[in-house]
């Protein structure tokens, strides 16, 4: 029997830049929709090498952490690749957070330096002062370094595949944000996973990216996979519906891909220019972080654009499940099937045994794109025999398609029966008069808990409890029907745009007298139950 010698493959992600600079030096790697800046692969290689050398010149060493507070721009990707080449771990900070929250993350990650762009200079310095970070670097200066004064571009360096590249803090929907670790290997395997599902390997791919780069969605759903395959990423500093539609509609820009959350995509449909926008070059819109409504699916189908729901999270690549098929399958509410190199189980959280088809279980994931763990937290709490416990509830049908039922913690018990919020929300969002909906369990003297529907009404629409019950009839069991309704101007959201269920529970469990009758929107609007984000 022949025995092959063992080999350790060392494939730092920064080699993507060096490779494409050698084979397509004049092709555009990065662009800015805001400024018109365009960066070729050859220019990117030069910038990355110099910025990596500058990081080391400032005293950073492999394994050190550097926090960053910055808008979407090509220089943010320059910094990412430079940090990885130097072996420095990126800690992107969410600029929507307050100083105390960013301070916590800097202290938790024990960052050695903080870099910021001009927009966020003052808040970033406040964070550095609060966290005791001594080294503060201006991102514009760092990423536009020139050779000379002893600064020589750093070439690609060998890194172990398991070396950490990023610490991405979760949104903290169920508690204190945790720092999910991203490695060279997990970034690479995620790029492989999304390859087939999103068709990112074509040489003319151009992704418009208005999603924040402190979030796994903005970084790794499409952006880094597209760069791995030599495509172009065009940044936009903010989500601006009119600006996004104008940029996509200009066919000379050649936008082929977009990724966002359904709630944000809805703002494009609501923009007055949506109807006249030409989506002729658009190939894929990949969605995550919420329910893709039939209204959205049909609105974009009318434009000739297929929406592709996906499921995942900061810890999972992020892409774990992706729907590759078109409208008919998407209308069923599925988020698809597992990506190539990720295994998925649905497990009874009490018995830790796999559940049958069409039975709700906890989503467990295993694969090389899944996080190796959390910063400063024991893996035993989140992994079982190498399987990552997501805390999400889902079911799988006989054809292998998955349907997310919500968070296990986003569940309540009514008369001893489990009710998953997402299952009810997915039914109610089909109503044309319902723009957004969140279901929570609230105390009930008879049943223990019953459902409360917190609804944002469509413009000019009248929402009643009777209408909600009619929508539920024949689709879900009666014990899952919401027993209370409140109509609000907006739902509270956390820093990454997810509905803040904890805030809703605290608000309604302590402050608001619940309605049990079937009064209409007019009556509800007279009450001061505004739980919108302030």
Image (tube, grey):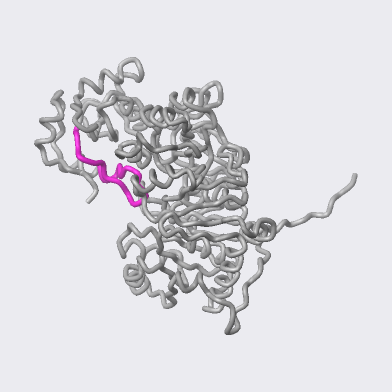
- Can residue 353 be seen by looking at this rendering? no
Quarter of the image that includes the N terminus: top right
Residue lying at 66% horizontally and 66% vertically, measured from the top left: 156
- Residue 321 in percent (x, y) is at 53, 36
Q: Residue furthest right?
A: 1
Q: Pinpoint residue 231: horizontal percent, then vertical percent.
A: 58, 50
Q: Relative to 217, does residue 87 appear above or below in the rendering?
A: below
Q: Residue at x 50, y 42 (%)?
A: 389
Where is residue 414? Give x, y as percent.
Answer: 29, 27
Front residue of this view, candidates 104 and 341 = 341
Q: Is residue 45 above or below residue 428?
A: below
Give the magenta range: 486-504
Left or right position of 248 against 514: right
Mostly what secondary structure, the magenta segment?
loop
- Say which of 73 and 129 sits in front: 73
Q: Can you tell which quarter of the image residue 194 is in?
A: top right
């Amino acid at each position: 029997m022949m025995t092959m010698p063992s080999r350790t493959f060392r494939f730092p992600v920064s080699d993507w830049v060096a490779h494409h600079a050698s084979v397509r030096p004049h092709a555009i790697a990065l662009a800015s929709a805001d400024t018109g800046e365009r960066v070729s692969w050859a220019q990117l290689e030069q910038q990355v090498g110099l910025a990596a050398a500058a990081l080391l010149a400032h005293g950073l060493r492999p394994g050190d952490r550097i926090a960053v507070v910055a808008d979407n721009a090509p220089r943010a990707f320059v910094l990412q690749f430079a940090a990885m080449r130097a072996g420095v771990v990126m800690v992107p900070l969410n600029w929507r957070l307050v100083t105390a929250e960013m301070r916590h993350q800097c202290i938790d990650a024990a960052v050695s330096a903080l870099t910021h762009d001009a927009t966020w200079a003052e808040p970033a310095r406040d964070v550095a002062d609060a966290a005791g970070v001594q080294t503060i670097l201006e991102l514009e200066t760092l990423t536009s370094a020139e050779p000379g004064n002893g600064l020589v571009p750093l070439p690609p360096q060998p890194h172990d595949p398991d070396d950490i590249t990023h610490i991405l803090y979760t949104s903290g929907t169920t508690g204190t944000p945790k720092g999910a670790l991203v490695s060279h290997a997990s970034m690479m395997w995620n790029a492989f996973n999304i390859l087939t599902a999103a068709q990112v390997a074509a040489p003319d791919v151009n992704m418009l990216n208005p999603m924040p780069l402190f979030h796994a969605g903005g970084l790794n759903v499409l952006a880094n996979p597209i760069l791995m395959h030599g495509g172009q990423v065009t940044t936009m500093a903010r989500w601006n519906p009119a600006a996004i539609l104008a940029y996509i509609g200009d066919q000379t820009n050649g936008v082929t891909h977009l990724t966002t959350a359904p709630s944000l995509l809805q703002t494009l449909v609501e923009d007055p220019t949506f109807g006249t926008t030409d989506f002729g070059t658009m190939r894929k819109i990949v969605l995550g972080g919420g329910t893709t409504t039939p209204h959205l699916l049909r609105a974009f189908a009318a434009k000739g654009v297929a929406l592709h729901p996906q499921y995942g999270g900061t810890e999972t690549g992020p892409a774990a499940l992706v729907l590759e098929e078109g409208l008919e399958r998407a209308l069923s509410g599925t988020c698809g099937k597992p990506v190539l190199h990720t295994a998925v189980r649905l497990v009874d959280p009490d018995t830790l045994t796999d559940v049958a088809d069409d039975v709700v279980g906890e989503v467990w994931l295993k694969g090389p794109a899944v996080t190796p763990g959390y910063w400063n937290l024991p893996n035993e709490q989140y992994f079982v025999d190498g399987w990552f416990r997501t805390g999400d509830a889902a079911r799988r049908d006989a054809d292998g398609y998955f349907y997310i039922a919500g968070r296990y913690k986003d569940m309540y018990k009514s008369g001893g029966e489990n009710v998953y919020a997402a299952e009810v929300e997915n039914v109610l969002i089909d109503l044309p008069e319902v723009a957004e909906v969140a279901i929570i369990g609230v105390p009930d003297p008879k049943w223990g808990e019953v459902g409360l529907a917190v609804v944002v009404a469509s413009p000019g629409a009248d929402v009643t409890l009777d209408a909600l019950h009619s929508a539920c009839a024949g689709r879900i069991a009666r014990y899952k029907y919401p027993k209370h309704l409140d109509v609000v101007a907006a739902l509270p959201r956390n820093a990454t745009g997810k509905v803040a269920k904890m805030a809703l529970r605290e608000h309604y469990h302590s402050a608001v007298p619940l309605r049990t009758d079937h009064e209409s929107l007019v009556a509800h609007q007279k009450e001061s139950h505004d739980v919108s984000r302030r």
